Structure formats: C-alpha cells, structure tokens
Image: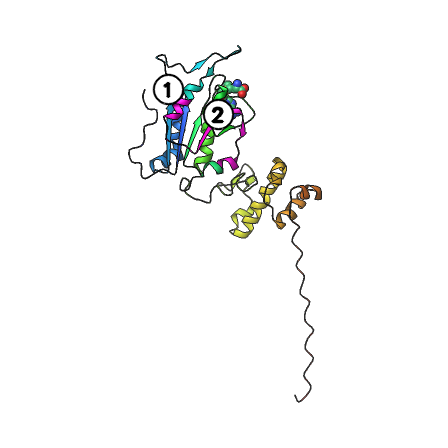
Amino acid sequence: MTDPLPLPDDTAGTPGLTFSFLTLFPELLAPFAAEAIVGKARERGLLDVRLVNMRDFAGNRHHKVDDTPYGGGAGMVIRVDVAERALASLPAADEVILFSPAGQPFTQAVAEELAERRHLVFLCGRYEGFDARTEGLVTRELSIGDFVMMGGEAAAACVLEAVARLVPGVLGDPESHQADSFSSGLLDYPEYTRPPEWRGQSVPDVLRGGNHGAVAAWRRGQALARTLARRPDLLVSAPLTPADTVTLGELGATPEQLQEWGAPPPPRPKRRKRPRPADPDPPPGS
Ligand SMILES: C[S@@+](CC[C@H](N)C(=O)[O-])C[C@H]1O[C@@H](n2cnc3c(N)ncnc32)[C@H](O)[C@@H]1O
C-alpha cells in the first residue's frame, strides 16, 4: 500500500507531539498533515503525523474490517479485534481517542489539555461505528458536535487543527492564540485590515490612533459585547475584572446576571484629594 503521507526528508529532532490516525481512508487526512502550518511544523520536526490504514490489520485476505451487527439492523460495524491489532502496531500513547457522536464535547479546554501530551492516537469510525467493546481500548471518546457525519476523519482533522496550533513553536507568535475565542474565556474581538474605508464602512478610529492602551480597552469591550450578545453562557466561566463588570453593566447586563457570572464588584470611584488648608502666614519677624 502506498504511503499517503511520506515523512519529509529534513525533519529535525524529536517531535513535540505525534498524532497517529487509525482510519480506513488515510488519503482524506493526508492534506491536513502535509499542507499549511501543520506541514511546515512537520518539516521543522515540531510535530509528527502517522496515518495507519486499519485495513492493513484486517487479518484476512480481503482486507475486510467490518461485519454485520449482532441483533440485526442496518449497516456494518468495525471489528474490535481489527482496532486492537492496529493500536498494538503503534508506540505507547498518552491518549487513545475514539471519535463518536456520543463522546465528550470537544472544546478549547480539551484542545489545551491534549496539546500537553506527546503522542495522541485517533480512532476514526465509519459505517455504524466501532464494536462497543472498542470503548475499553481508549482513554476517551470525543464528539465535535451534535450531528452525525459519515466518518471520524473530519472530526480528527478538526482536533488536529485545534491542538497542533497550541504546541509551542508551531505558530510564529506564541501570543497569537491567547486572545482567540475561548482561550481568553470570551469570544474574540473583531479584527480589521486595509482598506480603511470599504463600501461606506470605516475601520474604527481607535484602531488607527496608535494609543495601545485605548486599543486594548476597545478590544476588551468588543469581546465582552460579542460574548454577551452571542454566547452569554461563556460568561459564567470567563475571568472577569472589575472594569469588565462596569462594561457589562453599560452593555445591559442585569445585576442578577452579573452575580450569576461571578463578576467582581466594580472598581471604587477614586476619592478626589481635598486640597490641604494653606499654612497660616508665619508671625512677623520669625
Ligand atoms: C455514521 S457515524 C456512526 C454514527 C452512530 N451510529 C451514532 O449514531 O452515534 C460513523 C462514524 O463517524 C464519526 N462521527 C460521526 N459524527 C461524529 C461527531 N459528531 N463527532 C465525532 N465523530 C463523529 C464516528 O467516528 C462514527 O463512528
């Protein structure tokens, strides 16, 4: 079988994180591993990606990996012994993840956890999924949302994209993901670039004024406004500052909501210094 993802010749050093995909369609995943930032990170030796075709572990000359479900019903089920042999062919992993609509919802917090590991193995299902006994071979099951796809490869690609960018060195600017949606606990603020005027819409003046403090304050306000309007559920776990409490109040959040989100009290207004009474004039001749 041809390797859909030959390793780059010039890899350097031990990779920070290795992703191994067990799949029936390695060609679907190859571009995600070969192109763009992940492809560059592989060339730089920061990441490694292995594509394993489960058919190579079918154990029969027809490379058949599935069978009909016990109890009857539509579709085919991937055999547990095939999954077991494919897993055994890999070096030890920190996590073996099975993709399933019944899995734990995949979130940025899970991505951050996975980025700390050295070797992740992803089991991508097809047909009706894996024999239920496969669940005993994995450390967790992940779902990328409440919908059903035809296979786990797209889910695995999503997780690769989300985790790889958190591995140190993969993104040029290590701070670039810290303000991203969810990483900061809020949705990201809106971004603009040239042209400054487009079809009657201008870039906000504050972004062109060169005042870094004002830009930071504007961005924080925009992130709070977007989160309040689109995903107020996130505010419960977002780290909020006393200044955020003021902004959220100005944006229409009620005192009950602020309390539910654990918003800290607003900053106390600064007391204006009372002028000291002028010293009396020294007595004459002193
Ligand atoms: C057609 S689905 C199987 C659906 C399964 N019968 C069910 O209803 O839960 C085939 C495979 O696609 C993958 N898959 C589909 N939707 C997914 C989702 N939302 N998240 C993660 N994986 C998914 C899983 O690997 C699954 O084994």
Q: From the viewer's perspective, tell me whether residue 106 is left or right of residue 63.
A: right
> Mark 2 to mark 1: distance in Å?
19 Å
Image spot of residue 74 (x, y percent): 52, 11
- 105 to the left or right of 84: right
Label 1 element class: helix
The circle drawn on residue 257 is: none
The residue that label 1 is drawn on is 57
Magenta segment range?
84-111
Vertical arrangement, residue 83 with respect to residue 180, above or below: above
Visible residue check, residue 211: no
SS for dot 2: helix
State the image coordinates of residue 266 (x, y, percent, origin top left).
Answer: 66, 51
Q: Residue at x 63, y 50 (%)?
A: 242
Asked which quadrant contains residue 119, the reply is top left
The residue indicated by pointer 2 is: 136
**In the image, what residue type sits under mark 2?**
Gly
Q: Quadrant of residue 121?
A: top left
Q: Nearer the viewer, residue 245 or 73?
A: 73
Q: Amino acid at mark 1?
A: Phe
In contact (CB < 8 Å): disc 2 and disc 1: no
Q: Residue at x 39, y 21 (%)?
A: 54
* Circle 2 residues within 10 Å: few <14, some 14–19, many ≥20: few
Does the stretch in magenta take in 254? Answer: no
